[in-house]
Each structure stands twice: as structure tokens, then as C-alpha cells.
Amino acid sequence: LPISEPCLFHGSLYENLTFGLTQGAETAEDGSLQRVKDICSALDLPQEILDLIETKDRLCWSNVLSHTQQAKLGLARALVANPDILIIHKPAMPYDATTSAKVLQLLKSHVVNRGLGFTKEPVSMRSPRTCIFTSAKRYGLQLADRIYLIGE
């Protein structure tokens, strides 16, 4: 569950993005460097950040990255973890309209493809994925399979 405020710890960017995966994740498809970079690329993170994923640099990322970049990396971490159920509070909030649309489409792809960036097994062999998100606006709701309006 990514939080509204980005949370990156003092470690390499790759360690941050694969946090929570089992040991040896870098050799498993879930945490492969290529899959991690592909997910970050799908979120339109710039090449400089994609290059930093390959380094062992252990930086204070809040001083290096913009708030938007940190938010995208938090979402990337959630998608790399590949949970069966992903719950996100206002996933489009920190972005402009174009980026918001891309983020919501990527979440839809996560559900439809039963995960992102997997090549070894067909989609039909993977367990289903569910994404639940909140929104204060009606933006992006056309991508939802179900909508629940909660009000007074």
C-alpha cells in the first residue's frame, strides 16, 4: 500500500524498489533489474533515474529526487511487489492530468495482465489481480470495473 507521502529509505534505489521481496529477488523474475526498470520506464521516469537503479549508490533520496519522482517510485515499488490485491489512496493526486491518466492506465494493465513485466508464463497461468483505489474526483473512473460512491 503506497502512502501519499513518498517514503524511500537510505539504500540503493534498487533496494528501495525491491523492498519486501524475498531474498534473492534479483535473480527471480519478480525483482529482476530489467523488470524493475521496465516498470519505472512505464511511469515515465527519466533516463537518469533508470540509470541510478543500476548503481549501488546509497543516497538520501528525498534530497536527490523531486516529490513527483518519489511518488512514482513509491508506486513502482508497489507494482514490483506484484500483490494480488493493491489498495491505493488517491493514486493520481500528485500528478498532472497526463501523468494521472498514465498512472491509472498502468494500474488497469496490472489487473488485466495479472502483474506487469512478466514474460516467462502466460497471463492465463498467473493469479488474478485486484486494484482498489480512492479518488476525490471522477477522473479515471471509466477504467474501473466497479465504482462505489461513498457519501453522506
Image (spheres, rainbow, N blue to C red):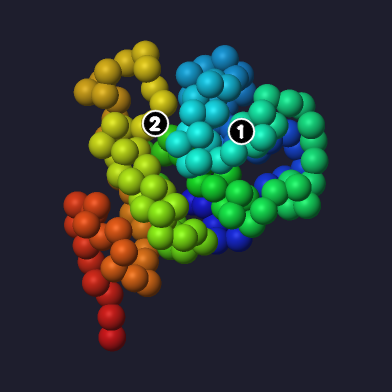
Question: Which quarter of the rendering shows the C terminus?
Answer: bottom left
The three-letter amino acid code for the residue at tag 2 is Leu
**Residue 47 left/right relative to 85:** right
State the image coordinates of residue 132 (x, y, percent, origin top left).
34, 54
> On screen, 137 above or below 113?
below
The residue beneath circle 1 is 47
Give the farthest residue toward the left. 145
State the image coordinates of residue 128 (x, y, percent, origin top left).
27, 35
State the image coordinates of residue 67 (x, y, percent, origin top left).
64, 57
Q: Which SS class for mark 1? A: helix
- Pointers 1 and 2 in contact (CB under 8 A)? no
**Residue 15 left/right relative to 143:** right
Kindly report the distance in space between the C-alpha atoms of the residues bearing marks 1 and 2.
Answer: 20 Å
The residue beneath circle 2 is 116
Q: Nearer the viewer, residue 71 or 130?
A: 71
Q: Is residue 74 visible?
A: no
